[in-house]
Amino acid sequence: MLDNGNGLLFSPAEPWRKERKRKTHNLNLDYNRLYEDQTAAREAILHEILGELQEGVFLQGPITFHYGIHTKIGRGTFINFNFTCQDDTTVTIGEHCNFGPNVTIVTPLHPMLAAERRAIRVPDGRDLRLCWAKPVSVGNDCWLGANVVICPGVTIGDNCVIGAGSVVTRSIPANSFAAGNPCKVIRTLTDADSLRHRPDILGDCEIL
């Protein structure tokens, strides 16, 4: 079938896809069995799973990647418990992001009509289950709260905060605080959000 990066239909049952998913699913289990202080072994597995892994990335685990090879994670990013990434196409996560527990990123889409989900005829005459996928991108310095779901085709700009439990169905511009289901921009983040204005929280600490 056609390539999954171009937004056209493909078969998840293609042999190379099944082989890659099986390998990645097994590597997920290997990672999840390790203790947190087995850092070298954990990093080695992530390099096997992911398309790109920059320095200083920490995935708490357990993790669930679908393909893995379609995902890139930028340096200094922290991802908390129970991260799920169904990366049938490209997923890009920027630098210095913070993900809360139970964040899910989904790229594949299925036909709305039940009969079309069961099978579509392909040019060689076979009737196959097909889907398609849209890439997801999370910019640099984003904070995604617990239980955020990012849907196919979404781009989240740099410096965004996405509130806990949000279902992000549309792209979010940079420097936004957005929340809800469906997720909507609540306001633009400004200096008024600085902890400089919250001495009750800042205490004796100093903003750099």
Image (cartoon, helix red, strand yellow):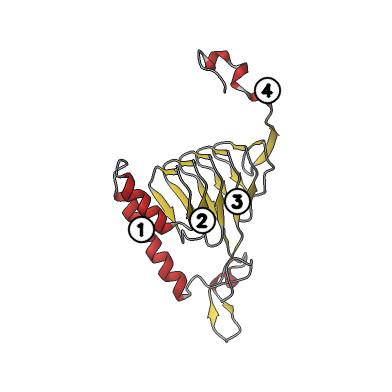
| Cα distance between the residues tagged 1 and 3 | 24 Å
The numbered mark at residue 71 is 2
Q: What amino acid type should be assigned to the residue bearing mark 4?
A: Ala
Mark 3 — residue? 137
Which percent across, then down, holds residue 157? 65, 44
Cα gap from disc 4 to disc 3, whole angstroms: 27 Å
Q: Which residue is mark 4?
A: 192
Q: Earlier in the sequence, mark 2 or mark 3?
A: 2
Q: Is residue 155 above or below residue 129?
A: above
Furthest residue toward bottom: 125
- Real-space CA distance between mark 2 and mark 1, rounded to the nearest whole angstrom: 15 Å
Precedes in sequence: disc 1 or disc 3:
1
Q: Which corner quadrant holds the C terminus?
A: top right
Q: Secondary structure at mark 3?
A: strand
Disc 1 target residue: 27
- Where residue 109 sits: x, y (%)? 59, 62
Secondary structure at numbered mark 4: helix
Residue 185 shown left or right of residue 95 in the figure: right
Of the 4 image quadrants, the one containing the N terminus is bottom right
Task: Say which residue appears at 46% left-offset and 45% top-offset.
Answer: 55
